[in-house]
Image: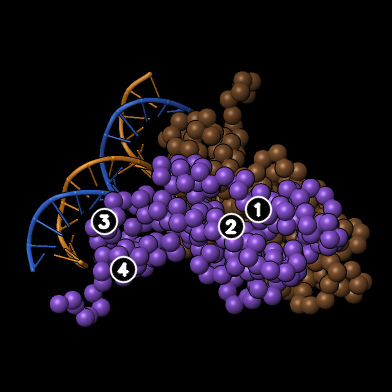
Chain colours: A purple, B brown, C blue, D orange
Amino acid sequence: MPRIDKMQSEQERKDQIKKAALKIFAEKGLVGTKMSMIAEEAGISQGLSYRYFESKDEIFALLVEEAIEESRKAIRDIDKFSGSPLEQLKSFTLQMLDENHKLYFLLVQQALTLEVIPGKAREAIERYSPQETIERIIPIFVRGQQEGVFSEGDAYKQLILYFSVVNGLILQDAKVIGMDWIREVDRLLNILTK
Amino acid sequence: MPRIDKMQSEQERKDQIKKAALKIFAEKGLVGTKMSMIAEEAGISQGLSYRYFESKDEIFALLVEEAIEESRKAIRDIDKFSGSPLEQLKSFTLQMLDENHKLYFLLVQQALTLEVIPGKAREAIERYSPQETIERIIPIFVRGQQEGVFSEGDAYKQLILYFSVVNGLILQDAKVIGMDWIREVDRLLNILTK
DNA sequence: GTCTATAGCAGGATAGAC
DNA sequence: GTCTATCCTGCTATAGAC
């Protein structure tokens, strides 16, 4: 007879720890995060995480892999957003800014700024060539240019600019509370338009 | 008789260590930076830094104070840039992106994302109310609006947006080498204009 | 004044009680 | 299955030789 109380299955416990870890890692990075912080955030004791994961590095690597997988999926699905290039990009941007994606995004940023990242995380990062993202988004920019809405110039540079700007927005968002960034996305996209 | 060789005065040695520390701190944050890294960057032995500074925290705090002082100065001098609001802002932005200011900027970012920062650094951060920056820059935005160049709306929000965007640009700049960001500043300012 | 060696401590990981 | 009490490594900071 299964238990009815709030006791959790192994998978649920793992998810709980991972969720807590994601929040702290995204905020403080790999070295800045102590296992005790993750435990506290998850509401468990310091040593328990090790019954579910081998090491801090393993959790980090796991999350980075998930983040990258999530990101690939978002990129793959970008054509599902209907509308003009501008509207597509707006939908995509808003998606990046939502709660879940934001944390993943910050985590990858953390991983990218580290020189010494755990082997598995490094693999995931290296496997995920930005080429994939670029090939997927550049056509949208080009279409925007052809339709005369986007400004002329090197679409690749525009893309990098666009991402670094969204990056800055997400980073800021982590600090300034109570600001409705979503409203600002329109203004943001002015970077790209004529 | 003073020595003629490359032996350094106490002040020069301090500056050398501080310069090395700034570079590493800006990149890896307080916890991510090991004293051995600073020593290596400065080309000295691991223990020597402690003849010139009391602790890692002291160096960090010192640099944060300098960074903030530098930032106040840049803000105070913003009216010295001549020209239209747009040109003023462009000059100011380019200044933020130059080598020196960039590192300071990243350092303050690091300090802002930490919860536990050394007492002195915390004081400096708290003493430096963003109010000062805001009061200085808002009038430029307002003037831009009055002249019909900047888009309408809450100038405060535009300011925050602008800073988070520049922030993203600086962060990206630390990673993507060989990209001439300066050329992109014009495009960046499109966020603000009609 | 600078280096090398090490003391001391913080934090990751483990062992053992419950 | 979870917690508490350690072990052990790696880093900050210090001591002492040159």
Q: Residues within 10 Å of mark 3 (few under 14, many from 20)?
A: few
The residue at 26%/56% (across/down) is A50
**Amino acid type, mark 3:** Tyr
* Residue at image location 30% in from the left, 65% down from the top: A11
Alpha carbon distance from label 4 to label 3 = 15 Å
| Circle 2 chain | A
Q: Say which of marks 4 and 3 sits in front.
A: 4
Relative to A84, B115 lies left or right = left
Q: CA distance from mark 2 to mark 1?
A: 7 Å
Marks 4 and 2 share the same chain: yes
Residue marked by disc 3: A50
Q: Which residue is mark 1?
A: A136
User: The disc labelled 2 sits on which kind of residue?
Assistant: Arg
Alpha carbon separation for disc pair 2 and 3: 35 Å
Q: Earlier in the sequence, mark 1 or mark 4?
A: 4
Q: Give the secondary structure at mark 1.
A: helix
Asked whether the beta carbons under mark 2 and mark 1 sit within 8 Å of each other, the answer is yes
